[in-house]
Structures are given as structure tokens and as C-alpha cells.
Image (tube, rainbow, N blue to C red):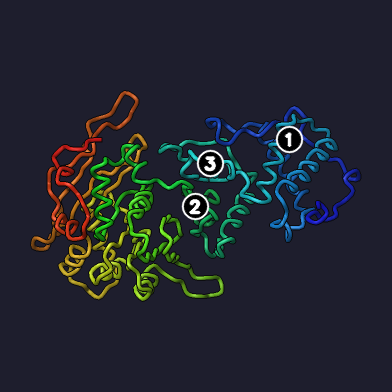
Amino acid sequence: MFKDFMLRGPDRKAAAPQARPAPAQVAAPVAAVAQPYRKIDESLRAHLDLKSRLHEELLGRLNLTVLDRVDRAELRREIGGLVHDYLARENLPMRADDTERLTDELIDEVLGLGPLEPLLADPGIADILVNSFRNVYVERYGKLERVPVQFRDERHLLRIIDKIVSRVGRRVDESQPWVDARLEDGSRVNAIVRPCAIDGPTLSIRKFSRDPLTAEKLIAMGTLTPASAGFLRALVEARLNILISGGTGSGKTTMLNAMSAAIDPEQRIVTIEDAAELQMQQDHVVRLETRPPSAEGSTAVTQRDLVRNALRMRPDRIIIGEVRGTEAFDMLQAMNTGHDGSMTTIHANTARDALSRLEQMVAMIGGELPVQAVRRQIASGLQIVVQLSRLADGRRRIMSISEITGMEGDVITMQDIFVFRKRGRSETGEVLGEFVATGIRPQCMELLIAAGVSVTSDAFTAGGGAA
């Protein structure tokens, strides 16, 4: 019953009237994701003020300790009654559908993440970027756009950020002004606050796809051709070590998830991430996640620590969400000592740059490692580099699938097996081009054949399989 989760409050009739905006100023909230951005007007400000007053009154009467056990439908009925009573008491007329929307927003404030909830529910949005409490952008289908969503004030935004990070045992304040976290659905979150964020708290959310993209879907989208998709599947099945490279937002994790679907479900997979977001489709998966130093002084757990520990867990495959630092050395050691079929991603603009970045990461461990020795570790440990990019029209494409063929002197040699060849822009701004085979037969064909994986040589005919 309502009395179980509502504390006794003051007599509603006895509440002292206060100055309120005129009824005409109280308008329905602007739909957060259904309209293009327009300047926040006074009617929306009045709506936010009204919601703030209702929220404060509601918090004063909620028994927060039992909310997680309350049926949402029952909570909605009772909060709806409180909203009706409040509007009647303050003589603020509102249409029935607007009242229902206001009730839903209050439930989002109590149980969810307030103004973020409609954006999180929109399947067309990939990223939510909160630049300040009144300045919110989203990425929708590869394009950034501003949306008419705002928080009541900076304190409101900070409360939402604290709700997010506290759920995963982390904190953010002046002594630790930034934090990486994740939502319950796996969405990746980064928050940074004052004094590092000059204009106030900033929040970035990379949404977790509820319906992970498969190779078949990537073919339908034009990201892959049947020939290149078959080649990537063969590489995974034959347990070649693969590096997926690309810039921010180019789809590296999406590609890693899609390729991992080809892993034998009987194999033991260990994943290592800063913030868990990989979507393995196999059952035998052990997921490891780093830990920052705590406020109590406990030491951090780094990706390098987890890679070292993973080697003691009898893994068939080690998958690192993104290699960023000294763990690159341990990863290469694992790839060169029998842990075949490992995969990871890296931030780089070209396949060649990816190898250079990997080399720099290994050098971070110190010890004056000879450059040639590091490059030989890379050349012998890695076989394939998949390069991704987000094009000018917002679409994410594979730019190349390249094979590492060995060393010539001090230089790691590579050859492109598939490439994306641009041929201009359409009248609508779409980048035109085809993803085609270069005509080079990969050296790893012998490894694929030895592993019993079937790939026809026709897949590598020059210009074939264009898409």
C-alpha cells in the first residue's frame, strides 16, 4: 500500500500558498526526442520549476528504503494522485495527457535518471552528451544534434551523476573530478566535474545496444560484403590474432562483438575491460573489469594486472576491450606463447598507425627494450588489422582488412586484402565508394586450410564483392 512507501507529511490543506507562475505559463514538457532543438523558453522553465517543487515534496514523503520493492504501477497511481492534488491546491490547470507525462517524469526522477530516461529509451540514439545542465546533445544515426532537454540546475545534474557512479561503487567530487562507470544495461559512462570541467558537470554516455549487430546485419548495412564477412569469420574460427583499429566512435566495439560470434562456444573466453560493454554470445565467458583506487586507499586494479591474472585462468581466448597502455606488452606475450585467437581494439587512424601506437605502448613499460625486438613481437603475435572509420556522412565503415606478413629489416610489412575505395559524394552528402578485394591472396590461407576452415580463392579476386 501507499502508506508503506510514503512517509507521513504535513496536512496538504494546511500548506501555505506561495507565489507561483500564472497558469498560462505552465506548459507540457517538450518531448525530448521527437522534435529538433529549439531555445528553452519560459514555458519549459516554468514546467521545470513546477516539477522541481513536486519532486521536493515527493522526496519529503517517500520511504526510500522500500522503493525497490514497490510495484511501479502502484507507485504511479499514488504519485499521480499527489500531482492531481497539488495542481488543484495551487490552481494550476493542466490537460490530462500532460499530467500523465509529468507523473512519468517524476517517476523517472525517483526510480531512474530523470531527463536522461527518454534519451536512453530512444533506440536511434547512440551517444548522449551533456555539456552542462542546460546543454544536451545526442548522436543519432551518426549525426550530432542538440535536443530540448535540460536539468533543473547544476545540482540536479550532479545528483544524477552521483546516482550513476554510486551504483558501481565509485565516486566523483573535487578530489576525484572524473570517473568512468556504466549503467545497469551496460552503457558506458564518463563524468567530469568542477574544477576540471570549467562550465560545470559534463556527462557522456555511450549507449549499450540491446540488439547487437551481427555480421549479417553489417552486410545489410553495407559495412561488409559477403566475401569480407566470410574472410573475417574464417580468421576467427582459425584462431588468428586480430587487432581492430579506428578513431573514436568508429564502431570498434561493435565490430569486435560481431566477430566474436564466430568463436566456438565450447572455448573458454576471458574478457578484460575498463568498463564492461562487450557482448559475448557464448556461455563460457569470464568477464573481468578494472578498478580505480578507492577513497579508502585500496590500490587500483589495472588492465595489465587482469591480463596477467587471465593467463592463470586457462583461457582459450583473451579478448581485451581496448588496449591503452602497458598491458600491450603482456597481451603480445600471450599471443606469442600459445593464446591464439585473441582480439583487442586500439585507437588509431590507419592500420600502420595502429602498429606504431602498439609499439609505443609496449615501450611504456621501460627497460630500454630494443625497437626491433618489440616490432618482431608485434609481427609474430598479430596476423590481422581491421581498420574502421566514421565517414563524413556519419556512417561507420571498414576501410581495410590488412595482413601482417613479417619483417623487412626493421619495418613490419603489411598487405591489404580488402579496402574501401572512395569515389566522391552524392548530392545528399553521402560518401560513395565500394569495399572490394585487392586481388592479393593472403599468406594466412595455409593457416585457414590447416584449421579446416573453408575459404574460396574467388573471394580475393581484384575488385570482387563490391558493396
Circle 1 sits on which residue?
A: 99
Decide: few, some or many residues near mark 3? Use Cα within 10 Å; few <14, some 14-19, many ≥20: many
Element marked by disc 1: helix
Label 1 amino acid? Thr
Rendered location of residue 155, percent (x, y): 64, 51
Inspect this view and state whether residue 309 appears: yes
Residue 119 is situated, as x and y percent measured from the top left of the image, at 55, 42
Name the element at disc 2: loop
Q: Is residue 53 visible?
A: no
Q: Position of residue 163 (x, y in %)?
A: 61, 56
1 or 2: tag closer to the N-terminus: 1
- Distance (Cα) linking label 2 and label 3: 17 Å
Q: Position of residue 307 (x, y in %)?
A: 36, 70
Disc 2 + disc 3, Cβ < 8 Å: no
Above or below, comparing residue 459 to residue 190 in the picture: above
| Cα separation between marks 1 and 2 | 30 Å
Q: CA distance from mark 1 to mark 3?
A: 24 Å
Of labels 1 and 3, earlier in sequence is 1
Q: How many marks?
A: 3
Q: Which residue is mark 2?
A: 187
Is 339 on the left-hand or right-hand side of 102? left
Q: From the viewer's perspective, tell me whether residue 117 is left or right of residue 11.
A: left
Q: Secondary structure at mark 3?
A: strand
Q: Nearer the viewer, mark 1 or mark 3?
A: 1
In the rendered view, tell whether residue 214 sits above or below residue 89. below
Amino acid type, mark 2: Ser
Q: Residues within 10 Å of mark 2 (few under 14, many from 20)?
A: many
The disc at residue 136 is: 3
Q: Amino acid at mark 3?
A: Val
**Quarter in which the C terminus is drawn:** top left
For this orientation, the residue located farthest to the top is 427
